[in-house]
Amino acid sequence: MIIVGDLFDFWFEWRHSVPSAAFPILAALYELRLHGVEVVYLGGNHDGHIGRFLRAEVGLTIFREPFEAVIAGKHFYIIHGDGLAPADHGYRLLRRIVRWKPTESLYRLVHPDLGIWLAYKLSATSREFFSHRIIHSAEPYRAFAMKKLDAGYNFVVMGHRHESEFVPHPNGGFLAIGDWIRTGSYGVFDGEKIKLVDSEKV
C-alpha cells in the first residue's frame, strides 16, 4: 500500500512525543504491517515531517520526496504534488524553509502541546484562505504527469489535489487519487492497469 501524503492534517515527531490524534490510523497501519503488508508513506504538505517514529515503531517505508518504483514490471513515478502549480511559487519557498533541518530542530524546542495547537491553527487558517482562491486547476498537474509519461513512465500517481481522475496515456496513465477522506477515492493496481475507485460514485 502506498500513501501519497496528507494522511494527517499535521504530523511532527518530537523525541518522545507524536500527535495523539493520529493513534487510530497508526494502530491500523501497524496491524497491516503485522499481517505482512508493506506500507510506503510519502509525506505531503500537511505531514512532510515524517521520520524515525513512523519508520521504527510503525514499520513504514518512508519517503520525504517524490520517488520512483517498479511494480510488476511497470514504472511508477509517485509524487504528492504540492508546489507544481504556477500559483505555488511562494509556497515552494516556504516549503524549503519549513522542511529545512535547522527549522525542524528549532520547532522541536517548542512544547508538543503548544506546537500541535499552533500547527492546527495555521492549517485551519491556510485552508480557509486558500478555499477562496482557484489555485488547484488540474492542468499544471496533468501537464507534469504527461511529461513523465512521455519520458517512459507507465504510471504517475499524485495526491494533493482534492479532485480524483484517471487520464489514460499510451504508456499507462495518470492517477490523481483525490480526497479519500471526503469521497473515499483511491487507486488499485492489478499488475497491468490502475483503476480509480471512488466510493461516492460507486
Image (cartoon, grey):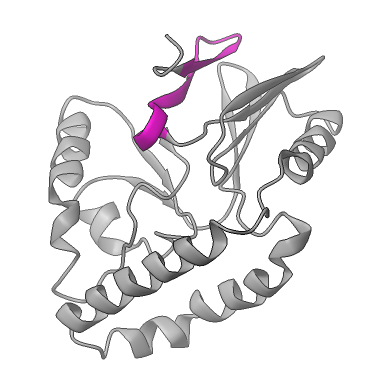
Q: Is residue 194 magenta?
A: yes
Q: Is residue 170 above or below residue 75?
A: above
The quadrant holding residue 59 is top left
The quadrant holding residue 14 is bottom left
Where's the C terminus, which quadrant?
top left
Q: Is residue 167 above or below residue 8?
A: above
Q: Which residues are magenta?
A: 180-197
Q: Is residue 163 magenta?
A: no
Where's the N terminus, which quadrant?
top left
Left or right: 2 in relation to 193: left
Front residue (pair 64, 195):
195
Give coordinates of residue 178: x percent, y percent.
Answer: 51, 34
Q: Is residue 95 above or below residue 21?
A: below
For the point 81% across and 33% down, the residue is 146
Give coordinates of residue 24: x percent, y percent.
Answer: 13, 44
Give coordinates of residue 94: x percent, y percent.
Answer: 59, 77
For the point 71% across and 39% down, the residue is 138
Q: Is residue 123 above or below residue 140?
A: below
Front residue (pair 11, 77):
11
Front residue (pair 91, 107):
91
For the point 42% across and 70% down, the residue is 125
For the point 13% across and 60% down, the residue is 20
